[in-house]
Image (tube, rainbow, N blue to C red):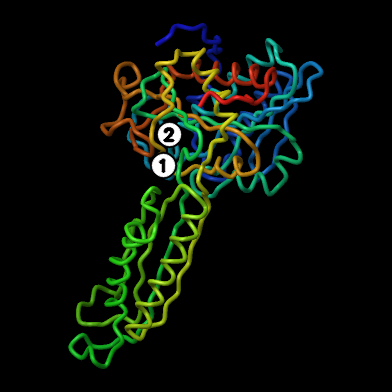
Amino acid sequence: MKQTAWIKVPEAIYALRRDIHRHPELAFEEQRTADLIACTLESWGLEVHRGLAGTGVVGTLRCGTGNKSIGLRADMDALPIQELNQFDHASIHGGKMHACGHDGHCAMLLAAAFELARTRRIDGTVYFIFQPAEELDAGARKMIEEGLFELFPMNAVFGMHNWPGLDAGQFAVRSGAMMASDTEFRIRLFGKGGHAALPHQCIDPLQPLMHVAQALQSIITRNLDTQDSAVVSVTNVHAGRDGSLTVVPDDAWLGGTFRAFSRDAMALIERRMTEIARGAADAFGCRVETSFKSDYPPLINHLCETSVCIEVLRKLVGEEQVITNGKPTMAAEDFAHMLEHKPGCYVFIGNGNGEGVHRGAGHGPGPCVLHNASFDFNDDILPIGATYWVRLAETWLQKGAMKKPLI
């Protein structure tokens, strides 16, 4: 890795990261975390606004006379997972843990705010966005609905997420689709229950349900453009009650998720699911209900803003450490809502593979991967991520978006 001068992160911010990890809070419950962040920003002289989406925090730093503004976003919420780690900063709240590194995201952005407030080398405005409820309830959408971009009229917005498996010091970014949408679905079929020995007196909802489960996969192979990628996963099938094996149930349902990289593909999949379910229900004499919940659209990076990020990253860690030709991931991220309203870019920062000091005493037995009960954010990357935020803010406020993209 190119050796560069990372900013010096105060020890208090490392301690703060571990304090947040030790006190995880779920979606829209991040009151203690928000208090800690708001008080820290205020102590450095930043303007602080609280209350967007309930627990959201936005810090504002204005320097010079420039009229450009940039938003930098971190997420604050934890996951409903019982932590297996036994180190000193392990969660003290049963069934809750920072298994996705949002504690580290907050710390990296706070370290950047500290450095920018200390040096004041920017000419313009930086908005530091600390968002609740990324994991389960699309807090980004809620912040936008409550006036995020009207109250803080930024010209562009940027996000970053740690990524296990990428080496510490590596980054991955691409223009266009970076992450997929996430739509949860449920298909319920209603028949007429009865004795399993007398099926002719019943309307069995399980028969069409099994046809539907198989036919849903045909949407990907026979309806979607072969150049597009998407996933349909049935993850729940429910029928019958009390474990009885001699009763044809009155109703049965299946549910799951589908992922895609465009709004058009999302609409096509939802339409075909509905048509398949209705067709099967009609063929077997059942009634059908379908429901869809789409909290996360595809995350689409903007070309010119992505070029700025790539330029900053190459100067920061070296061209060989910046992966720009990787495949998008089917994971979803509600920063996508922000990118539907403002130009910007989302990058992955390598969190390492969990070996060495990062995988020290007290670490749980599982792999150090996202959403795993043995995960922990790698503190070694805290200055790298913070330096990226600082250099990005300085560069963007000076130059703006590139007119001739690098990619």
Q: How far across and how far down the image is residue 154, in percent?
A: 71, 33
Q: How far across and how far down the image is residue 275, in percent?
A: 42, 72
Residue drawn at the location 63% of the way across and 48% of the way down: 142
Q: Residues within 10 Å of mark 1 (few under 14, many from 20)?
A: few
Q: How far across and how far down the image is residue 211, in percent?
A: 28, 72
Residue 204 shows which numbered tag? none
Q: Quadrant of residue 65?
A: top right
Q: Residues within 10 Å of mark 2 (few under 14, many from 20)?
A: many
Mark 1–mark 2 CB contact (< 8 Å) = yes
Q: Can residue 22 be seen in this view?
A: no
Q: Is mark 2 on a helix, strand or loop?
A: loop
The image shows residue 142, relative to residue 65, as above or below, that is: below
Query: Alpha carbon of mark 1 to alpha carbon of mark 2: how far?
Result: 7 Å
Residue that lies at the very extreme toward the front in this rendered image: 404
Q: From the viewer's side, name the closer residue of 384 and 284.
A: 284
Q: Can residue 25 be seen in this view?
A: yes
Image check: 165 left or right of 42? Answer: left
Q: Mark 2 points at which residue?
A: 91
Amino acid type assigned to the residue bearing label 2 in the image: Ser
Q: How far across and how far down the image is residue 147, in percent?
A: 73, 44
Residue drawn at the location 71% of the way across and 24% of the way down: 42
Q: Name the residue under label 1.
A: 94
Residue drawn at the location 59% of the way across and 35% of the way down: 32
Residue that lies at the very extreme toward the left in this rendered image: 197
Q: Is mark 1 on a helix, strand or loop?
A: loop
Amino acid type assigned to the residue bearing label 1 in the image: Gly
Q: From the viewer's side, name the closer residue of 275 and 48.
A: 275
The image shows residue 239, relative to residue 50, as above or below, that is: below
Q: Quadrant of residue 233?
A: bottom left
Image check: 248 left or right of 24? Answer: left
Residue drawn at the location 45% of the way across and 42% of the way down: 79
